[in-house]
Amino acid sequence: MRVSNLKIENFRGVRAGSIRFGKHPVFVGDNNTGKTTLIEALTLLLGRDRLVRELTEHDFYGSCPQPADRIRLMVTITDFPNDDPEHSSQWFRDGRAVVKWVDEESGTVHPQRDDPAWKLCCQIAVQARFDAETLSVEVLRYFHDHDEPIDPFTEEPPAPVPGKLIQELSFYLVRASRTWDKVFSFGNELFKRTVLAAAAQPATALLAERDRLRAPEQPIDEDPGIAPLIQNLNNELALSFPNAPKVQLRLTGTDSRAVMEAVSAHFASSDGFSIPAGRQGSGLVSMQGLLLLLELGRARAASGGEFLMALEEPEVHLPPSAQQRLVQRVQALSTQTFVTTHSPLVASMADPTSVLILKKHDGAMSAEPFLEAPLPAAAPNWQRKFFQHSRVDVLSALMQPSLLIPEGRADFQLLRCILRPLMIVGAG
């Protein structure tokens, strides 16, 4: 399954916007053009509850919602098996989605299939309102099956989207602000899901460690430094209670769950020292979480399941060579990816038709493709150089708030000669 269209209304800095997606879109644009807003909208629509942040008034456009104001988000999901509702009965039946058909050329959704090129789809919507009495935001996620706008808070509630279907979509978000020093831990939800999907629970090793912790060779309570204190406590207990148990000190609760939650990743260096992940550099910590997600994606792909990933700024903490490998691996293992970036190198790795340049004016968001359609075989050399060979430089320029375009090679050389010393002076 794949998301083909997203509509946003009254959410954060976006008053209205509609974006169509390919398989692996990459979003570029200046700050405050809506890249994070777009990712957060997808998370509200497709993410598990643990991924969703609690909304406040500031999540409404203008930050001061009135009683009638609503955040409205909607995605169109397509690529169902064989475009046959009977093959996806868990999605299309009473109490679930209504069968619809999307024309991906225009993004228009139709109730009937009048063109064999149209694809089976369903639509999921989220609405939110601010309750002035409780001072909280109420959020509903449901199947959107109406052509006319509805208010699910005042009308009969529409069909909710079951959590089981949200799990089937397997949407994961890697935020730009990622600090994952405990990612390789059974206390981490992502790690537990990956173990269940991609590996077997290490029950034998964990039970052995549990038993060792229950009867350690050198108990802490028998250490000469603390043994007198523990002995005094046990003596007092014995005076107060017949058959009183004795105090012992152990590293964990010594049940299976306590042992699992105590597990944490260490990195062994070439000199033999083992250092906890939290004491490593931010690049290594960030990379380990991303690699764990890739393992989950690998397991999902092997089982024929869905795996949708939203990745904010993969260039954070990673060198250029690692950025390239990471994005390529994510795209290879994912059903669909959504990548936001400020790096022209990351953006240049995508197909030019998949790079969407976000713009926002007076709250209206738009997404213009870097290249509308693939270059034909007869494309002139300047187009090939512009969209292929010099793609990194062109995208770097397009990420700037404004551009100065010379009329010819002589003007270009002159401007470059003027710009170089100005950049040196500015850096100094």
Image: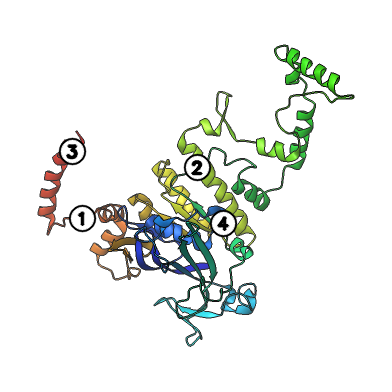
Circle 1/circle 4 CB separation < 8 Å: no
User: Residue 232, position in %: x, y?
Assistant: 77, 15
User: Looking at the picture, which amino acid does disc 3 mark?
Assistant: Gly
Residue in the image at 47% along x and 33% along y: 281
Label whose residue precedes the other's in the sequence (4 or 2): 4
N-terminal-most mark, 1 or 2: 2
Labelled pair 1, 2 in contact (Cβ < 8 Å): no
Circle 3: element type: helix
Name which of mark 1 and mark 4 comes first in the sequence. 4
Say which amino acid is labelled 2: Met
Residues 125 and 412: in front is: 125
Q: Residues within 10 Å of mark 2 (few under 14, many from 20)?
A: many
Q: Nearer the viewer, mark 4 or mark 3?
A: 4
Q: CA distance from mark 3 to mark 2?
A: 34 Å
Residue corresponding to mark 1? 402
How many other residues sit within 10 Å of disc 1, few (<14), some (14-19) or many (≥20)?
Answer: few
Above or below — where is 70 with respect to 267? below
- Cα distance in 3D space between marks 4 and 2: 24 Å
Report the mark closest to the observer, 3 or 2.
3
Which type of secondary structure does the marked residue at label 1 adopt? loop
Gap in Å between the C-alphas at discs 1 and 3? 18 Å
Task: Check disc 3 and report the residue beneath it.
Answer: 426
Residue linked to disc 2: 287
Query: Which one is in front in this view, the residue at disc 4 or the one at disc 2?
Result: 4
Tag in front: 1 or 4: 4
